[in-house]
Image: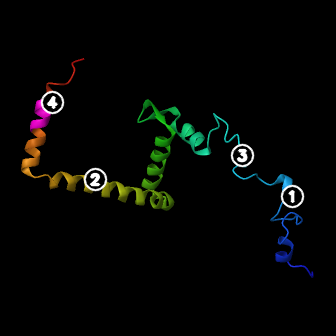
Amino acid sequence: MTDSFDDKTQNKKQFVGHPMPPVEYRFKKGQSGNPKGRPKGARSTYKILDDILNKRVQLIQDGKRVKLDRRTIILLQTVQSAMKGNAKAVQTLLPHMLEVDERKEAIKNTHEMLTTDDQKIIEQFLKDNKNDEPSA
């Protein structure tokens, strides 16, 4: 090859190839490549998965019929599997268990940080606003 790519790009209108489509097919300045955009009502994969997981299913738990969403059922099955000694289930659950413990500890520490004066103010506020609740 005697001509290099740079030599051919000197005159962009003449060169047609991988990085340079024909001039008549290039995007015009300020024009989107997808002018109509995503159609209304088109659902993402995450939305579809969320809808599937939120669907409620009836099952028997402890001898009683209960309706639970699929997400909860998956978590219950994972916990039961971990309790039976499934190492993969334990490995899956452990980080989440630690995170839940950390969150509980953070909430506990926040409550402990309240001084006695803060607690009195909150109690007084709740007492004052208890009468403001609309009766059913």
Q: Nearer the viewer, mark 3 or mark 4?
A: 3
Residue corresponding to mark 4? 129
* Image-quadrant location for residue 105: bottom left
In the image, is residue 103 above or below residue 134?
A: below
Mark 3, residue position = 34
Q: Quick one: label 2 or label 1, which is nearer the N terminus?
A: 1
The span shown in magenta is 124-128
User: Which tag, 2 or 4, sits closer to the chain's start?
Assistant: 2
Q: Nearer the viewer, residue 129 or 27?
A: 27
Instruction: Please name whichever residue, 106 or 97, is drawn nearer the observer in this view of the structure.
Output: 106
| Magenta segment main secondary structure | helix
- Kind of residue at badge 1: Pro
Q: Judge from the rendering whether residue 48 lies leftward or rightward of residue 8; answer left or right.
A: left
Mark 2 touches mark 4? (CB < 8 Å): no
Q: CA distance from mark 1 to mark 3?
A: 19 Å
Is tag 4's residue or tag 1's residue first in the polypeptide sequence? 1
Q: Earlier in the sequence, mark 2 or mark 3?
A: 3
Q: Secondary structure at mark 3?
A: loop
Residue type marked 2: Lys
Question: Which x, y percent locates residue 78?
Answer: 48, 50
Q: Residue at x 84, y 53 (%)?
A: 25
